[in-house]
Image (cartoon, grey):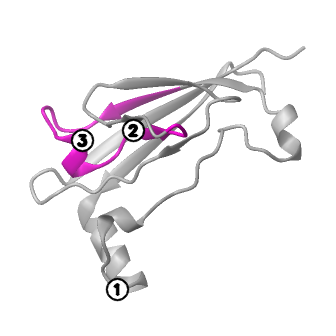
């Protein structure tokens, strides 16, 4: 692959989340979901050959949304939180910054959001 970047689009829909939760488990506290921290390149054998070096996350949600109420965003391993508010871009070193992407919860009025993630890769010879 000779591209200089890789990207994904994550779309969050509150109604889909609530439907899936009702099928999979009993309703629980929103704060009970704790994802593990990790670096994007991983810790396994492939980490040394992974060429991703910089990750950009652009959050697209409703303007003037409250990240504390709606969730989303990123928490860095030292527990610094960056809310997934509209038009916020977060840049991370893909190979060094241990973080977790927080689940988006939404509410009845703000039920959809998205995050565009682009990984910039180092040029290989």
Residue 114 is left or right of residue 45, and the answer is left
**Does 79 sit above or below residue 11?**
above
User: On the image, numbered disc 3 is attached to which residue?
Assistant: 67
- The answer to if 60 sits in the magenta stretch is yes
Residue visible at 31% across and 65% down in the picture: 30
Work out whether mark 3 precedes mark 2 in sequence or the reverse, and give the earlier one. Answer: 3
What is the x, y in percent for residue 10?
Answer: 43, 46
Q: Quadrant of residue 113?
A: top left
Q: Crowding at label 2, few (<14), some or many (≥20) Cα neighbours within 10 Å?
A: many
User: On the image, numbered disc 1 is attached to which residue?
Assistant: 26
Give the number of callouts.
Answer: 3
Q: Are marks 3 and 2 in contact (CB under 8 Å)?
A: no
Residue 95 is left or right of residue 49, and the answer is left
Residue stretch rendered in magenta on the structure: 56-78
Query: How far apart are labels 1 and 2 at the CA level?
Result: 27 Å
Work out whether mark 3 precedes mark 1 in sequence or the reverse, and give the earlier one. Answer: 1
- The answer to if 47 sits in the magenta stretch is no
Q: Are marks 3 and 1 in contact (CB under 8 Å)?
A: no
User: On the image, numbered disc 2 is attached to which residue?
Assistant: 115
Query: How far apart are labels 3 and 2 at the CA level?
Result: 14 Å
Residue 76 is left or right of residue 48, and the answer is left
Mark nearer the viewer, 1 or 2:
1
What is the x, y in percent for residue 61?
Answer: 24, 38
Q: Secondary structure at mark 2?
A: strand
Query: How far apart are labels 3 and 1 at the CA level?
Result: 25 Å
Residue 47 is left or right of residue 118, and the answer is right
């Amino acid at each position: 692959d000779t591209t200089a970047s890789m990207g994904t689009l994550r779309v969050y829909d509150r109604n889909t989340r609530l439907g899936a939760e009702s099928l999979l488990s009993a309703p629980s506290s929103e704060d009970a979901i704790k994802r593990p921290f990790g670096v994007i390149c991983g810790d396994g054998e492939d980490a040394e050959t992974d060429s991703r070096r910089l990750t950009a996350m652009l959050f697209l949600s409703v303007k003037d949304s409250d990240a504390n109420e709606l969730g989303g965003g990123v928490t860095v391993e030292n527990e610094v939180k960056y809310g997934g508010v509209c038009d916020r871009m977060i840049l991370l070193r893909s190979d060094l910054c241990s973080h977790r992407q927080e689940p988006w919860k939404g509410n009845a009025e703000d039920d959809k959001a998205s995050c565009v993630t682009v990984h910039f890769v180092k040029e290989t010879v």
